[in-house]
Amino acid sequence: MGSGVDVYYSYTYALRHPVIIGRIAGWRLPWAVSATQLGAVAATTVVLLVTRTVWAHLGGVGNLIVFCVVVGLVGWAVRFWRVEGRSPVRAVAGVATVMFGPVSRGGVYGTGRPVREFRPVRSHGTLITVVADPEWGVGDG
């Protein structure tokens, strides 16, 4: 191409796709799910089973339908969920790092070392005052 235009391709977005799980312990899932979906479904299942005395008053079939619908909706809802451009797992990991990391008034470097605050230093300088002299014709171009 003699037009002098350089074309560059970026495959970063393609490399950021979530890990997809299709088999668990040799058992093939009916459809592939991401690790975030699997975690959300597992957490929702545990919460619903622990709190079933609160919500389960519809009889056996009604409770099963509510359970399946809620778990399915949660799994579907987190499919494309992003928190500031990150997957929810990475966002939670970032929050945990900040909450349980070293505490420093000035913050920390990427390596975890606290930022050292420098002592204030007095500046020594000279004050120069410029006064416009009317005899010089300031503004006369």
Image (cartoon, helix red, strand yellow):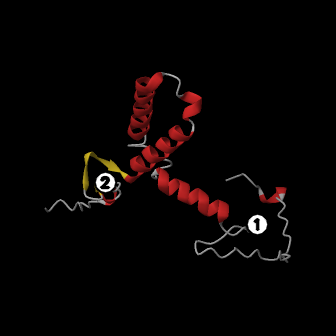
Mark closest to the chain's N terminus, 1 or 2: 2
What's under tag 1, amino acid-wise? Arg
Residue at which label 2 appears: 20
Residue occupying image coordinates x 57% and y 37%: 51
Q: Quadrant of residue 122?
A: bottom right
Residue at which label 1 appears: 105
Residue 82 in view, yes or no: no
Give the percent coordinates (x, y) of residue 105. 76, 66
Q: Is residue 139 left or right of residue 65?
A: right
Q: Which label lies toward us, 1 or 2?
A: 2
Give the percent coordinates (x, y) of residue 7. 24, 60
Give the percent coordinates (x, y) of residue 12. 33, 60
The N terminus lies in quadrant: bottom left
What's under tag 2, amino acid-wise? Ile
Crowd tier of the residue under label 1, counting other residues whose Cα lies within 10 Å: few below 14, some 14–19, many 20 or above:
few
Residue occupying image coordinates x 49% and y 22%: 58
Give the number of callouts.
Answer: 2
Tags 1 and 2 in contact by the CB under 8 Å rule? no
Crowd tier of the residue under label 2, counting other residues whose Cα lies within 10 Å: few below 14, some 14–19, many 20 or above:
some
Q: Residue furthest left?
A: 1
SS class of the residue under badge 1? loop
Q: Nearer the viewer, residue 140 or 3?
A: 3
Residue 16 in view, yes or no: yes
Q: Is residue 115 above or below residue 86?
A: below
Q: Quadrant of residue 113?
A: bottom right
Residue occupying image coordinates x 43% and y 26%: 60
Q: Is residue 84 left or right of residue 19?
A: right
Give the percent coordinates (x, y) of residue 87. 45, 52
